[in-house]
Image (tube, rainbow, N blue to C red):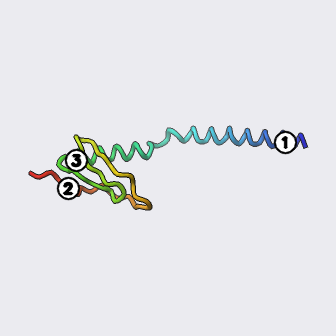
Amino acid sequence: MRHTLCKLAFSLALAGAWATAVLSADSGAAPQPDQTAADSMKDFIAANPDCLEFNDRCSFCAVVNGVAECSTPQIACVKQENQCTKRASK
């Protein structure tokens, strides 16, 4: 029984080390979703300087001093391209 427990402990330790190696190898492969979304939002604001409010059908955002302040995403939404919903009066 003791031999079986040692084999089980060794197997679990080996599996944990393997999982850590796999996860750490993937961590730098792609940008984080939050960073990608932030870059996309900055690009949208830069391309639409007169836009005061916009949304992606999930979060609703207002541009305050050049920075987007957004709501929490809706439950079970399907994110789409950002669309300006209110522009500055000219």
Please tell me whether mark 2 or mark 1 is closer to you in this view.
Answer: 2
Kindly state the secondary structure of the residue where label 2 is placed: strand
Q: In the image, is 64 to the left or to the right of 34?
A: left
- Quarter of the figure with the N terminus: top right
Q: Which mark is residue 86?
A: 2
Q: Give the residue drawn at x 11%, y 52%.
A: 89
The residue labelled by disc 3 is 47
Please tell me how crowded label 1 is: few (under 14), some (14-19), or many (20+) other residues with Cα within 10 Å.
few
State how many labels appear: 3
Residue drawn at x 35%, y 44% as measured from the top left: 38
Mark on residue 5?
A: 1
Nearest to the eye among marks 1 and 3: give it: 1
Report the side of 17 relative to 50 (left or right). Answer: right
Q: Amino acid at mark 3?
A: Ala
Numbered disc 1: secondary structure: helix
Q: Are marks 2 and 1 in contact (CB under 8 Å)?
A: no
Q: Residue furthest front?
A: 71
**Given the image, on which type of amino acid does mark 2 rest?**
Lys
Mark 3 or mark 2, which is nearer the start of the sequence?
A: 3
Give the residue at x 39% y 54%.
Answer: 73
Q: CA distance from mark 2 to mark 1?
A: 65 Å
Q: Position of residue 26 (x, y in %)?
A: 54, 42
The tag earlier along the polypeptide, 1 or 3, is 1
